[in-house]
């Protein structure tokens, strides 16, 4: 069977590309060719910018594809482009949406595919909702063979999952833990979150690919493991051989200090999430996530520690963390003096 992946070298798509290559799929990756190191053996790269519709149409002319999956589709304009390019070209089009699109705050703690999509806090999430609506409308009107996949926080060996970090990634937080400096944790650390290793996501995704029962459907792909954010940070610390000095700050205060944190916190991580993966397991019998976070994060931390190119300092975030902690401690000190 043949699949075309738009992107194919990111956190999620690299794992998917790899497992497909291992299961005798003929894989084509359409991207700009900037991450050749992430291309699995046997995959063929079609080098182009997906927004260059004329070139892309020429590259795929005459190709018979069982699956097309777009891993870098974020806005309704991207969806309209994909519909123009891929109508009649594939038996299944998979759109990677996001579990952050589910309603905030939740009306019920357990999330199913039937949980309403409504997130007034995050532009990214609202764009994903709009993309889903356009694709399902096209499915109803023309039979465009779409499957919607909703991942939550998915990580690999290059990415440490954290709730509060700077614009340059999470290394600075790891470095603070290594230096016994306090790290910011939103809320009181007791909200639940679900982390999914990219290899687990990829095995589920493989079962969705070419699955006719998934056409016209939305499917959650997450682990069944739910951990508090305090536990998540403690496991990161354990992987580093350190006791994490957690400093709890309300999400509202953090978002007020840095408005760019609003979508990721108020619109996502401050809400407890527990996912019901029953639908996924009906579509992919026998599937179960097998990498617990305690195991996966050790792999990630060890990989980052052994790859200096992934250790990107972020002095701006380091100062931000120190200022937030100082202001909070000063406020408490003044309150006690009153």
Image (cartoon, rainbow, N blue to C red):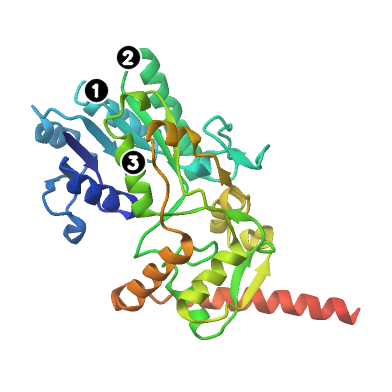
Q: Assess whether mark 2 and mark 1 are in contact (beta carbons under 8 angstroms).
A: yes
- Circle 1 crowding by C-alpha within 10 Å: few under 14, some 14–19, many from 20: some
Residue at image point 60% right, 79% down: 182
Identify the mark nearer the N-term, 1 or 2. 1
Residue 251: x and y in percent read: 65, 59
Helix, strand or loop at mark 1: loop
Helix, strand or loop at mark 2: helix
43 sits to left or right of 272: left
Residue at image point 30% right, 29% down: 211
Q: Quadrant of the N terminus?
A: top left
Q: CA distance from mark 3 to mark 1?
A: 22 Å
In which image quadrant can residue 185 be found?
Answer: bottom right
Residue under label 3, please give it. 205
Residue placed furthest toward the bottom: 179
Is 294 located above or below residue 64 in the figure? below
Helix, strand or loop at mark 3: helix
Residue 16: x and y in percent read: 28, 47
Front in this rendered view, residue 292 or 145: 292
Work out whether residue 31 can be spotted: no
Residue at image point 48% right, 67% down: 166
Identify the mark nearer the N-term, 2 or 3. 2
Residue under label 1, please give it. 87
**Nearer the observer, disc 2 or disc 3?**
3
Q: Assess whether mark 1 and mark 3 are in contact (beta carbons under 8 angstroms).
A: no
- Circle 3 crowding by C-alpha within 10 Å: few under 14, some 14–19, many from 20: many
What numbered label is drawn on residue 142?
2
Residue at image point 50% right, 35% down: 278
Is 130 located above or below residue 138 in the figure? below
152 sits to left or right of 57: right
């Amino acid at each position: 069977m043949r699949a075309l992946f738009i992107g194919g070298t990111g956190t999620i798509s690299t794992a998917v590309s790899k497992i497909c290559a291992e299961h005798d799929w003929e894989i084509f990756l359409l991207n700009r060719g900037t991450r050749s190191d992430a291309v699995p053996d046997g995959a063929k790269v079609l080098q182009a910018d997906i927004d260059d519709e004329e070139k892309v149409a020429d590259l795929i002319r005459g190709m018979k594809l069982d699956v097309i999956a777009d891993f870098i589709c974020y806005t309704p304009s991207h969806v309209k482009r994909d519909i123009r390019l891929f109508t009649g070209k594939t038996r299944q089009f998979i759109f990677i949406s996001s579990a952050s699109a589910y309603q905030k705050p939740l009306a019920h703690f357990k999330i199913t595919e039937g949980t309403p999509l409504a997130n007034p806090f995050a532009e990214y999430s609202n764009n994903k909702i709009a993309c889903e609506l356009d694709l399902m409308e096209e499915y109803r009107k023309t039979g465009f063979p779409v499957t919607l996949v909703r991942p939550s926080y998915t990580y690999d060996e290059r990415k440490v999952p954290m709730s509060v970090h700077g614009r340059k990634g999470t290394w600075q937080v790891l470095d603070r833990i290594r230096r016994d400096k306090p790290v910011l944790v939103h809320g009181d650390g007791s909200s639940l979150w679900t982390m999914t290793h990219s290899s687990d996501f990829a095995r589920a995704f493989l079962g969705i690919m070419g699955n006719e029962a998934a056409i016209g459907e939305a499917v959650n792909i997450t682990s069944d493991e739910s951990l508090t954010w305090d536990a998540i940070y403690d496991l990161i610390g354990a992987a580093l051989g350190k006791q994490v000095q957690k400093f709890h700050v309300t999400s509202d205060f953090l978002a007020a200090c840095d408005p760019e944190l609003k979508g990721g916190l108020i619109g996502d991580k401050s809400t407890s999430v527990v996912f019901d993966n029953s639908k996924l397991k009906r579509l992919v019998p026998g599937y179960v996530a097998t990498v617990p976070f305690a195991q996966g994060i050790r792999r990630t931390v060890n990989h980052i520690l052994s790859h200096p190119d992934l250790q990107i300092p972020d002095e701006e975030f380091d100062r931000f963390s120190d200022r937030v902690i100082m202001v909070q401690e000063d406020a408490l000190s003044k309150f006690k003096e009153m």
